[in-house]
């Protein structure tokens, strides 16, 4: 059977899920099977989109194809490249908080993070008054509007980052290989389809193994219920810093995370599950940007991570996850982040929040106000997914 290699990979992938080291509960396993479904879909999409001569941008991750602690505030796109060919990227700049480009020399693997060969944001582009821009990527020497590809360049990643979900709108983007414009790819063959099914299977297994190993490198060696000082994101953008950690909380506990509202254009926080993906950020407040969060009069943002509703605007919902990952990101930076720009963490009994939180009374929210917050999230994500 032509599809047998992919079917075999799915069976092996199910075994990876059922033998994952973090499994404790039936809910962990249920979420694992849901993660598997998204990974199967993503692997097929990426294998069929592996087109370097007639390329197009593909959504790398989304609500139903999550991976790698995906950022709820970000639209991710990628396209494959040949390092010896020239590509023209054209688009219009939307009103999102950040638009960035990154060239990688490969994909993530269970033993390595791909090198970032080039990373920049739209501040380095010449954006026309109508929002239009273009960039050329190729082997020639770099010049204005042209990015030289290193000999091992393999993938172009584009991130469009939202801070105010209600008002910001995405732009447009497309890519073409310059010398192939107006031509067409050869017709499909049985051999090509067999190859794609095989590639999809390899991508599926690599994806699962990679992102189960990834947290061991950057999270699980940290003391539980702590977060690191801001640091340059490993394998990430040159203008991005992050702070990471992992938590384990009882239902009668709350984690208070205090962080200054940054002068960075984008500052976001999120929770992730032990499968190293975002929690449900559409129907629950499992993430907040600086624009979405309540800022106290002293300039600090105080987030409260808990299972039970404390009746506070900056409640971060655990949604039944007693363990998971914590992540801050700062992007489009104009300076290096300092320790004092980062978060401090306290774990307290839920009943002590009124005593432990400055400005507690001002931070409260009513059930009606909370419902409106969630409705706004649902509407904003629905609109964004159409972009």
Image: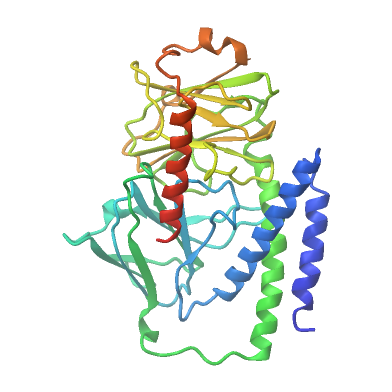
Within the image, what quadrant is residue 382 found in?
A: bottom left
Disc tally is: 0
Residue 301 x/y as whole percent? 42, 24
Q: Quadrant of the N terminus?
A: bottom right
Residue closer to the observer: 285 or 49? 285
Q: Residue at x 42, y 77 (%)?
A: 85
Q: Height in image: 258 above or below 180? A: above
Q: Is residue 117 visible?
A: no
- 223 displayed left or right of 102: right
Residue 273 x/y as whole percent? 65, 41
- 265 displayed left or right of 132: right
Q: Residue furthest top?
A: 355
Q: Residue at x 62, y 33 (%)?
A: 318
Q: Quadrant of the C terminus?
A: bottom left
Q: Residue furthest front?
A: 368
Q: Is residue 341 visible?
A: yes
Q: Residue at x 44, y 36 (%)?
A: 373
- 37 displayed left or right of 285: right
Q: Residue furthest left?
A: 129
- 74 displayed left or right of 326: left
Within the image, what quadrant is residue 26 found in?
A: top right
Residue closer to the observer: 132 or 342? 132
Residue 371 x/y as whole percent? 48, 35
Q: Residue at x 69, y 23 (%)?
A: 251
Q: How is the image coloured?
A: rainbow
Residue closer to the observer: 303 or 328? 303
Residue 346 x/y as whole percent? 57, 17
């Amino acid at each position: 059977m032509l599809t047998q290699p992919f079917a075999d990979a799915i069976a092996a992938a199910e075994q990876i899920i059922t033998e994952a080291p973090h499994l404790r509960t039936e809910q962990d396993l249920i979420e694992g099977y849901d993660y598997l479904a998204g990974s199967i879909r993503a692997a097929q999409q990426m294998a069929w989109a592996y087109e370097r001569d007639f390329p197009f941008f593909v959504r790398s991750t989304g609500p139903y194809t999550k991976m790698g602690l995906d950022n709820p505030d970000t639209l991710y796109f990628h396209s494959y490249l040949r390092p010896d060919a020239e590509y023209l990227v054209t688009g219009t700049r939307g009103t999102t908080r950040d638009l960035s480009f990154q060239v990688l020399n490969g994909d993530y693997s269970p033993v390595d993070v791909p090198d970032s060969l080039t990373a920049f944001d739209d501040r380095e582009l010449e954006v026309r008054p109508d929002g239009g821009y273009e960039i050329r990527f190729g082997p020639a020497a770099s010049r204005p509007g042209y990015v030289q590809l290193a000999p091992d360049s393999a993938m172009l990643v584009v991130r469009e980052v939202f801070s105010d979900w209600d008002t910001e709108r995405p732009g447009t983007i497309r890519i073409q290989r310059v010398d192939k414009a107006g031509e067409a790819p050869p017709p499909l063959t049985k051999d090509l389809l067999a190859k794609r099914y095989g590639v999809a299977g390899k991508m599926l297994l690599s994806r699962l193994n990679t992102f189960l190993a990834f947290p061991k490198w950057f999270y699980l060696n940290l003391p539980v219920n702590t977060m690191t000082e801001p640091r340059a994101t490993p394998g990430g953008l040159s203008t991005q810093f992050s702070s990471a950690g992992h938590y384990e909380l009882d239902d009668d506990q709350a984690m208070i995370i205090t962080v200054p509202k940054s002068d960075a254009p984008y500052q976001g926080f999120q929770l992730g599950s032990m499968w190293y993906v975002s929690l449900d950020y559409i129907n629950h407040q499992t993430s907040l940007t600086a624009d979405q969060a309540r800022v106290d009069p002293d300039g600090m943002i105080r987030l409260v991570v808990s299972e039970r509703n404390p009746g506070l605007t900056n409640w971060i919902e655990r949604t039944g996850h007693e363990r998971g990952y914590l992540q801050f990101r700062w992007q489009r930076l104009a300076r290096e982040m300092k320790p004092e720009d980062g978060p401090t963490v306290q774990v307290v009994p839920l009943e002590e929040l009124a005593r432990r939180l400055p400005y507690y009374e001002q931070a409260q929210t009513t059930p009606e106000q909370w419902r409106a917050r969630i409705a706004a999230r649902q509407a904003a994500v629905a609109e964004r997914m159409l972009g």
